[in-house]
Image: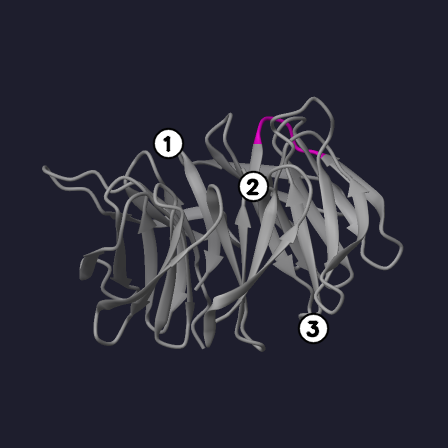
Amino acid sequence: MKKANMYIANTSSDTIHVIDYNELQIVDEISLCNQNRTYGPCSICDYKESIIASNLYDNSITIIQKRKPHLMETYYIGSACCDVKVFGDKAYIICADSNTLVEFNLIDKEIVEIIPLGNCPSYIELCKQKGILAICNVLSDEVIIMDVNDKKNYLKIIVGANPIKVRFSMVGDLLYVCESNFTGDSHGIVSIVSLKSKQIIERIPVGQLPLDIMVYKNYLFVSCYGDGSVRIIDINTKIEVGRIMVGGMPKDIFKINEHIYINEHLSKSLLKVQLKEENKKAIFLGGEANGIILA
């Protein structure tokens, strides 16, 4: 089986970086731009033999073949496409300017449905085993829970200030909500929400301006953009058990084996940090890197 590559969207340079994550080398750069259009890819996801980018500036999604990346198709979706996830043969895209979720059929290549959301939706998380979407509404301080088969009858759960990212637990019974609190002066929070009771059951303080969270086994990894740290939280005890000062402005975070990979915006680099020794390597990406996937 061919080893997966790491893919990173770069919003300001209109490219998708293809990374050999073991060697920390750029093996390809897929350019979306042409003379007449600026795309602004800001999120990517995997779909069969392709990857899909949501384009913030072009109001579209682009479907790119992994083996033949010069073969790509772009489809208009709606204003300010800021995130995309795929379930089955349907893509779900957030249009931030209209506060809507768009369902797009990837076989027929057409919009199926448009669902109104809350104020400033920013991110979609998908629980594949249950067919449930969780969507952060940053300015209305809520998370929407939506069944893909019953999208209009969704549930809103009120959380803390400025939820920016959300993850499902490994079995899909809990949500871990990253609350950035960028309108206040205090630290951020990770809230744990029970999907059974639809209530917050724990609130864990983290660093300044947390922007991403990742679940790995019994731990949460939280990148804190405001203080240059990655916080490690034990899921069972619900306390911080580690803190890695990576410096700069860490945003997207991804863990593979004993390393974490971080889009660091100040240096415009991808960082590779070995967890035990905290050894750090970096590769320059330039622009504004957003989103990390393996595909």
Q: Which residue is mark 2?
A: 140
Q: Earlier in the sequence, mark 1 or mark 3?
A: 3
Dot 1 lies on which element?
loop
Name which residue type carries label 3.
Answer: Val
* Residue drawn where x is 47% and y is 74% of the image: 150
Name which residue type carries label 1.
Answer: Gly
Residue bounds of the magenta highlight: 245-249
Does the magenta run of residues contain 120?
Answer: no
Tag in front: 2 or 1:
2
Tag in front: 3 or 2:
2
Q: Which residue is mark 1?
A: 287
Q: Which residue is mark 3?
A: 171
Q: Earlier in the sequence, mark 3 or mark 2?
A: 2
Name which residue type carries label 2.
Answer: Ser
Q: Looking at the picture, how far across and down is residue 64, in whole percent?
A: 26, 61
Q: Is residue 254 visible?
A: no
